[in-house]
Amino acid sequence: MAEQISKSRQRIFVLLTILLPFAILALVEGGLRLSGFGHAYPLFVEVKEAPGYLRANRHVARRFMVDESRTPRAVWIRPVPFLRKKEPGTFRIVVQGGSSAEGFPYDYAASLSGMLQQRLQSTFPDRKIEVITTAMSAVNSYTLLDFTNEIIELNPDAVVIYAGHNEYVGILGVGSGLSAGRWRPVTLAFLSLRDFRLFQLMQRAVAWWNSDSKRVHGKDRSLMATTAREREIALNSSLYQRGLEQFRSNLSTILSRYQRAGVPALIGTVASNERDQRPFISGQSPQTDEALLQRHLDAGQKSLESGQADAALAEFDQAVALDELSAESFYGRAQALDRLGRFAEARDAYLAAKDRDQLRFRAPEAINQVIREVASEYGAHVVDVQQALADAARDGIIGNDLMLEHLHPNTRGYFLIADAYYDAFRKLGMIGPWDHPISRQRAWEAVPVTEVDRLYGDWRVRYIMTDWPFEKEQVAFEFPAAHTTPEKIASAYFRRRIGWPTAMRRLLDYYRSEGNVAEAAKVARSLAESFPYRAEDQLAAYELLAEAGRPEAEIYRRRADALESGKDEAAVGP
């Protein structure tokens, strides 16, 4: 009997010994929380000035940073409010992606969300259409994965995804300077632990200890210069393959979650500048005769410059035969074929050059193959955005006619991306009867990009192109002189002297004073969509759209009436 008691005590002692460290950790965690230490960064937060509305959390990017002090200033989500509780009859869409889904450099105005919302709402004026964006610059599939459960909680009717460019050097990418580790299990562990205050305490201790983390990152440098650590990732290298595996695994989990939740997912192939973006970094195989390769490249370039495309093609063909990894060889070959009018072959060569560009700011074609394969496995709908842009591009090759630099579209390019998803919704028969679809021409005439948005975007692009990788060293940005009223407003906005809402309200006042009803209506509509809880903004949009002869004016009259009715009911009380 005594022996049994002794064994029982021994078991209890062992159990207490095992549990004691966990109890201590729980006490420390509770103490840190009670003291107010640390933060949680939910995807959506309440709008203080509008009870019942949510918006994207401007600071949500901090939850992906190993050191919060290094969070790039440019990484945030445009906070467009929406109702917490989805109203009956509302069709709710959530958009996920990186900067090309965000609408960089124009932000919400030219974004997939903004253009898609406007066109769908005009197509279905009797239904409320909500397009909620969670897109932001420099993020990849880890961010999309981390957002999925919070998105599902919104009860969306569809999710739209346009992503794939940032798998290598985006935040948490395998070659990123803002990474938790190159191995997926390590990154997933980081994401699962980040809300624990004890873990945050350890993060701060490591950040303090690491002198490099005390520097201010990204304050004066472009986001591209800030995020890229591995600047040479060769085609089919181990790091290259790890990026593809990371994307495949994350995308599989994302789409499987949406499939289980019964949420249709529309995922697009990604596009970039094929013709007019020379490879940033061209590598070569170790065994290649470098001097001989360079002779062929120089001779080919000289022939191109002298207008001898056939001779140039012969030289570049020899360069390609000499080294299959040389991006410059394929790019030169593409240019020669382009000048010979052999556009289909030229495009293949341009894409091959992009795939061999060792600076991974543009997704390789393998990313689009992964998108097609994983979408097929989980019943998602593939929207061939890349082909839609190629169909609209000069000679069928995507270039500066649709792109601003290496991968961000101009306003026409963004419109075509939104148009591809709009057409996908129509073909799938989603939302409702498509009795009166909005034509492409009519939709293009009403794109919600104001003159201030356009100027601001153009200046942002010019600014990032003063830094690496477009320049070896950062050069001074020459800010253009502002003469017109829209230019002065855009200048104040660009210099952060005023915010976007103030800029739009000043622009609206200017157009009204000038009697420019069409542009005033465009601005008023942007404000109404950005502030859906303000009756005065809905009424202004109604009045100006009606004066401009736009049939969608009634949408905003009904919204204004509903908001005013709600105020009256609140004033009267139950």
Image (cartoon, rainbow, N blue to C red):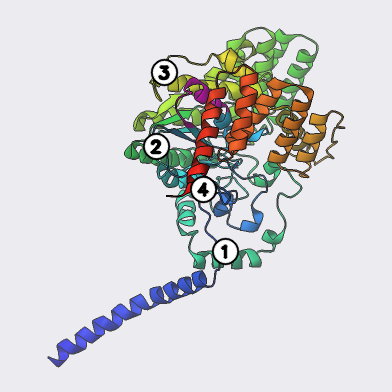
Within the magenta stretch, is there residue 222?
no
Q: Amino acid at mark 1?
A: Gln
- Which x, y percent locates residue 534? 59, 40
* Quadrant of residue 272 within the rendered picture: top right
Q: Earlier in the sequence, mark 4 or mark 1?
A: 1
Return the mark for residue 255.
2
Question: Where is 336 relative to 270, above or below?
Answer: above
Tell me which numbered mark, 3 or 2, is placed earlier along the sequence.
2
Among the two numbered marks 4 and 2 on one chain, the one whose residue lies closer to the N terminus:
2
Q: What amino acid type should be assigned to the residue bearing mark 4?
A: Ala
How far is the residue under mark 4 from the one under mark 2?
45 Å
Per the image, is 116 magenta?
yes
Mark 3 lies on a secondary structure that is: helix
Q: Amino acid at mark 2?
A: Leu
- Pick the residue in front: 231 or 169: 169
The residue most toward the front is: 572
- Mark sitting earlier along the chain (1/3): 1
First of labels 3, 4 by sequence position? 3
Q: Nearer the viewer, mark 1 or mark 3?
A: 3
Disc 4: CA contacts within 10 A as few (<14), some (14-19) or many (>=20):
few
Can you name the residue that lies furthest to the bottom here? 2
As helix, strand or loop, the secondary structure at mark 4 comes to helix
Q: Which residues are magenta?
A: 115-129
* Marks 4, 2: nearer the viewer: 4
Q: Which residue is mark 1?
A: 203
